[in-house]
Amino acid sequence: MTNLAIEAQGLVKTFGKNRAVDGVSLNIPTGSICGVLGPNGAGKTTTINMLATLSKPDCGSAKIFGYDILKETQKVRQLIGLTGQYASIDENLTAMENLTIFGRLHGYSRKDSKQKAGELLEEFDLSEAANKTLSQFSGGMRRRLDLAASLLSSPPLIFLDEPTTGLDPRTRTQMWTTIRNLVKNGSTVLLTTQYLDEADQLADDIVVIDKGRVVANDTPDGLKKSVGSSSLQLTVKNPDQVKVAAQIIERILGSKVQITEASELTAPMACTEKLTDILTSLKDTAIELTSINVRQPSLDEVFFALTGNAENKEGN
């Protein structure tokens, strides 16, 4: 078996005039967690749909463990599990009934389906809710059940499309433990997420996609180093002066400034010696600050430096 779980070259997918995926190439080693980041509408979900054989690429090629997604579709489907952004489980059935049906669809006998369902319910801490309908489930319980359903066939490659969206912090942490355990047990995980801390905590490698293209592919530490050794964070006292302050900082640092609603400005800063120039220019322009901080880079700085605008709302 190849050492690469995913090999993709030049994947393209268009919807009318919209080029949702524009030449995405990926090489993901087996036994790893790859995090895929990008603004809404970047092409993350569309890329997963092609790799999972749910959508055919208009151009390009891809292999899953050496099997072509177009020529050997059925074999590829036997090797993958997929948990999408929205639960695929039936609202009118109990947790046990849902998993038993999924087991039958995977070719298990009725007895083996129930046994496998029981094992997964215990693994995902859902045994006490086995005979409850989903109307009695919390959001976190639904997501755990959906993930359990995708693991019934024990796939070596698992696609997780924003699996923790909408979950509370405690349940998110539980899901992180589950994902780590999947890899310890031999699976490879491709994870898309809107949470930068999630990618930082879980991923061995991170792929950043923007406007349908891969704009960065490195380890979390490698990406952080790519935007400088430190970052500048300051708060402007007068909100009316925020844009002017941002222009001054961008001119001196030559990097994109992120502005929050609280008049906070954040920008990657490769050279801390430029801090004096910034403070002098702000003072000369009569811009007062209420706070200033220089800190080590995070994935937030990477994300904004690479994509510029994370407010695109056009889907994935």
Image (cartoon, rainbow, N blue to C red):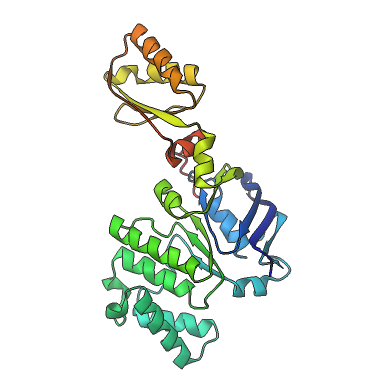
In the rendered image, which quarter is residue 132 located in?
A: bottom left
State whether residue 306 appears in this view.
no
In the rendered image, which quarter is residue 95 located in?
A: bottom left
Q: Nearer the viewer, residue 314 or 275?
A: 275
| Residue drawn at point x = 50 percent, y = 57 percent | 191
Look at the image and tell me in which quarter the N terminus lies. Answer: bottom right
Q: Nearer the viewer, residue 2 or 312?
A: 2
- x then y, percent, for residue 197: 40, 48
Q: Nearer the viewer, residue 124 or 71?
A: 124
- Is the residue 101 above or below the residue 222 in the image? below
- x then y, percent, for residue 78: 60, 75
- Is the residue 97 above or below the residue 178 in the image? below
- x then y, percent, for residue 28: 61, 57
- Is the residue 14 above or below the residue 251 in the image? below
Q: Nearer the viewer, residue 138 or 188?
A: 188
| Residue drawn at point x = 26 percent, y = 72 percent | 136
| Residue drawn at point x = 43 percent, y = 16 percent | 248
- x then y, percent, for residue 210: 56, 42
Q: Is residue 118 left or right of residue 109?
A: left
- Work out which residue is located at the far top of the displayed protein and give it: 284
Count every numbered label the image shows and give the total. 0
Q: Is residue 153 left or right of residue 73?
A: left
State whether residue 19 appears in this view.
yes
| Residue drawn at point x = 40 percent, y = 14 percent | 276
- Is the residue 144 above or below the residue 293 in the image? below
